[in-house]
Amino acid sequence: MGTKVSNGRESAADVHPWFLERWSPRAFSAEPVTDAEVTAIFEAARWAPSCYGEEPWMFLYARSPAELDLFRPLLVDANRAWADRAPVLAFAFARLQFKRNEKPNRWAQFDAGAAWMSLALQAHALGLFAHAMGGIHEEKVYDALGVPRDRYEAMCAIAIGRPGDPAALPESLRERERASGRVPLAEIVHEGRFPKPER
């Protein structure tokens, strides 16, 4: 038994449909995201689990034309080609030291990823999409947004908005505008020891 949803995805076991319905489109509507929606998205991220409850994530986001003009050039051109239409653009950061003792937090990136997934699922619950992208000008991000690079690591940018018309995308991206599949569960989960390498 499994779960099947309208975007064509089907799981090998019964899971909540949200995990299959959530995907990362590139076609966004320019329709604004409301204050309440923005707050809810980041509130969901706030409740993600973290090592020692440190919550080592930070999000900076832009919605106004002036702020978007600052944020958008921090994306690589391939991402700007579609993400410039998103009405909200955010950057996710991981704080590199524990607040409790200033020692390096080697789980910070892992925890920031948990916050991202919480954000993405809350966006889906609101009828929005969140598309994370690693294609950023990382060195420019710190200076442009005033982030201390010795304290934080820029993890990704996130485009947030309502679904748009794929016809508005560059032709090279239109055929990719669909939910992707996943490798079989047997490739990534093993009971017991690490499997012997194939010969």
Image (cartoon, rainbow, N blue to C red):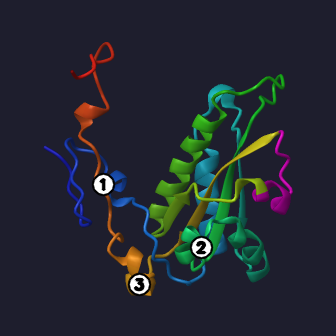
Determine the secondary structure under disc 2: helix
Q: Residues within 10 Å of mark 1 (few under 14, many from 20)?
A: some
Q: In the rendered view, does 179 fall on the left or right side of 154?
A: left
Picture layout, residue 161 above or below residue 117: below
Identity of the residue drawn at 45% across and 82% down: 170
Determine the secondary structure under disc 1: helix
Q: Mark 1 belongs to which amino acid?
A: Pro
Mark drawn on residue 165? 3
Tell me where residue 103 appears, x and y as whole percent.
Answer: 80, 23
3D distance between C-alphas at marks 2 and 1: 30 Å
Which quarter of the rendering shows the C terminus? top left
Between circles 2 and 3, the one closer to the viewer is 2
Q: Mark 2 belongs to which amino acid?
A: Arg
List the residue tagged with mark 1.
Answer: 17
The earlier-in-sequence mark between 2 and 1 is: 1
Residue range (magenta): 140-150
In depth, the one of 192 and 169 nearer the eye is 169
Identity of the residue drawn at 41% across and 84% down: 165
List the residue tagged with mark 2.
Answer: 80
Q: In the rendered view, does 57 fall on the left or right side of 67?
A: left
Q: Quadrant of the rendered structure where residue 89 is?
A: bottom right
Q: In the rendered view, does 77 fall on the left or right side of 56?
A: left
Identity of the residue drawn at 30% across and 14% down: 192
Determine the secondary structure under disc 3: loop
Picture layout, residue 1 above or below residue 120: above
3D distance between C-alphas at marks 3 and 1: 23 Å
In depth, the one of 14 and 36 nearer the eye is 14
In depth, the one of 147 and 7 nearer the eye is 147
Residue 198 appears in the picture as rendered? yes
Tell me where residue 90 appears, x and y as whole percent.
Answer: 66, 62
